[in-house]
Amino acid sequence: MRGTAGEWAWAVLVLLAASTAAIGDEQPVARPELVVLWSDPEQRVPVAVKRELFRETAALFASWGVTLRSSEGLDSEGRHDVRVVLLERSRLGNGRARVLGQTHVAPLEFPAVWILVPNVREVLEHAGEATSAPVLARALARVAAHEIVHALGLGHAPKGLMRRGLGASDLTRPRVQVSDRFQEDLLDALGPRVRHATLGRP
């Protein structure tokens, strides 16, 4: 589905520039890059929340050695790796078994992730957490990162960000816990995206 220029404002947010690191006399190697298309089809998620959500998600992946670039809209003409759809009116699950997000890899052309914003908000409220824009954005970023990692082929872990059934503390604590092998597995999954830079190239 494509939105016309009059219906959708396209803002490409380059959140983190690709960085390189040189080791000794070796050629610098670029960080793997992941391009995410964010869609808010109902246009109900506040702009302030989305802005902070994009920043928080990029910061998470940067801490794992991955440059994440974001754009927002309904279609990027295939120039993305994962689509993340923010659903503000959808709820799944009852009681404590709230579904926060879902990942669909096949048969879609591009992996897609759905985030159920009301469920994330309810998990925070049930735990007595404020749902201010920064708190909600951080929680949504944790859910988005969890599902994006699934879309890249990594499974659940016994604890930390990739465990089943994330709770309010997982979504709001200052530091994110991941398994010892998480970064290595993530970079392996993104291996084909690593580009070797040549010396002297800007």
Image (cartoon, rainbow, N blue to C red):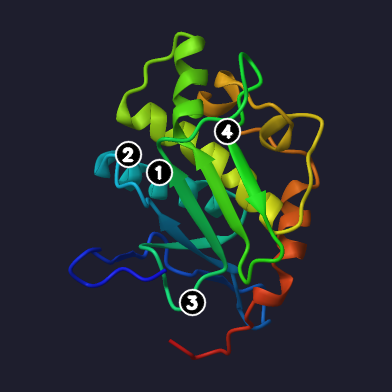
| Mark in the foreground, 4 or 2 | 4
**In terms of sequence position, does the residue under pointer 1 or pointer 4 come before the other?**
1
**In terms of sequence position, does the residue under pointer 4 or pointer 2 come before the other?**
2
Amino acid on which the number 3 mark rests in the picture = Arg
Quarter of the image that includes the C terminus: bottom left
Residue 20's place in the image compared with 47, above or below, is below
| Mark in the foreground, 4 or 3 | 4
Q: Which residue is mark 2?
A: 49
Query: Observer-nearest residue: 195 or 69?
Result: 69
Amino acid on which the number 2 mark rests in the picture = Val
Residue 16 image offset from top left, x and y in percent? 42, 61
Distance, label 4 to label 3, CA atoms, is 26 Å
Secondary structure type for disc 4:
loop
Q: Going 40% across and 30% down the picture, which residue do you hit?
A: 136
Q: Quadrant of residue 25?
A: bottom right
Q: Quadrant of residue 163?
A: top right
Q: Which residue is mark 3?
A: 79
Distance, label 3 to label 2, CA atoms, is 24 Å
**Mark 3 nearby-residue class (10 Å; few <14, some 14–19, many ≥20):** few
| Mark in the foreground, 1 or 4 | 4
**In terms of sequence position, does the residue under pointer 3 or pointer 2 come before the other?**
2
Secondary structure type for disc 3:
loop
Q: Which residue is mark 4?
A: 100
Tell me, yes or no, whether the two marked residues, 1 and 4, touch with CB atoms within 8 Å.
Answer: no
Q: Which residue is mark 1?
A: 53
Residue 148's place in the image compared with 195, above or below, is above
Distance, label 1 to label 4, CA atoms, is 15 Å
Query: Observer-nearest residue: 63 or 159?
Result: 159
**Mark 2 nearby-residue class (10 Å; few <14, some 14–19, many ≥20):** some
